[in-house]
Image (cartoon, rainbow, N blue to C red):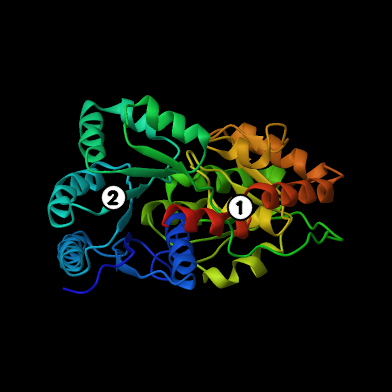
Amino acid sequence: MLRNSDLMMWGEFLPHTRTGISVSNTAIFNILKSNGRSVVTVEEYSWHRSCVGKIFHYLYNILCLLKEAVKRKPKHLYFNIPLSLKGLIKLSLILPILKLIMPSTNFTAHLHRGDIITFYKKRSYHQILLMLVFLYIDRIIVLSELFKKQLLDIGYKGTVEILYNTSSIEIPSFVSKSTYNRRFVYLTNYIRSKGIVELVECFSTPDMQELKLDTFGDIYENDIYNYICDVKTRNVKICGPINHESIGNILTGYDALILPSWNEGQPVILLEALSIGLPVIVSDVGDVKNIVGEKYPFTFIPRDKKSMKEVIGEFDTYECKNIIAENLYKRYQEYYSNNLFAAKVISLFN
């Protein structure tokens, strides 16, 4: 058997998977490795595979995880909590086995979602599965005080820690824009619950034709992608995925990021926009109001095209965009900077 590792991380990582979770996992890995910690990863990436391919990948991934568990016996096992039926069933089956193999290991789970209360109350078997998974988790990391309270309210009895997300593209000081060109960007994946359908339909109405929208992301739901390609008008450009390293350069070319999600935790792309001083127009979900501030004027009701259109129009005619942008940048530096994130990560895995 190899010597004990400080940490074994099981989950999604860049560049194979481009989501907020994979960005966060990669950031945690890099921080701990750069601080001399022994970190082993067991990567999971199956979103692009067929149904049969996913089954074989899951089986192979579990075998790799068990093999590393036997070899490494880490001080900490880190993984993410999925709020899906399949994901929780998988955890409820594998965690007891891992606990038998690694009885002294601290099981740390990271919850990135902002809708655990909704998920918990939706089905009785959701409640049963969550309670079963919780039995094997020593500590859960959440994104804010709001989500800590929600987790405790549904009955989790272990330790709860808070780790705010951060941005990998933050700039050292705010730079004001000299011109705004009525160009907007959506930069997340093509998934219905991200609000992409409502957004494209909104920009495709006759009274929005003078505004430009560019969208970027991986195609997770082909039917949704095909639909928005069919309904878009000439002022909307549908683009594919981009490298994570290109995000900063792309964002700076627009007036604002629009994030119309139905639910979020603490979206990394939102923090990335704030970290370079880019204004945002965002649905009022999850921890969004804590990120942008309670009085931030450019939030809208999720899944409501009328509300979305009104807020986009208000932003378009707003004369003090640079002041808004600078305030968002200062808020990011105060609560979500790389230095704050790194210090917290190191303290969590001492």
Q: Residue beneath label 2, please?
A: 107
From the image, which quarter does the N terminus lie in? Answer: bottom left
Pointer 2 or 1: first along the chain = 2
Residue 171 drawn at (x, y percent) = 71, 64
- The spot of residue 263 in percent (x, y) is 47, 39
Q: Quadrant of the C terminus?
A: bottom left
Q: At x 46% / y 35%, what residue is drawn?
A: 147
Q: Nearer the viewer, residue 186 or 149?
A: 149
Q: Position of residue 183 (x, y in %)?
A: 72, 57
Q: How many numbered marks, from 0 up?
A: 2
Alpha-carbon neighbours of circle 1 within 10 Å: few (<14), some, or many (≥20)?
A: many
The residue nearer to you, when weighing 130 against 258, is: 130
Q: Which residue is mark 1?
A: 271
- When the figure is inspected, residue 223 is found, relative to residue 16, above or below; the finding is above
Mark 2 to mark 1: distance in Å?
28 Å
Residue 213 seen in this snapshot: no
Q: Amino acid at mark 1?
A: Leu
**Residue type at numbered disc 2:** Phe
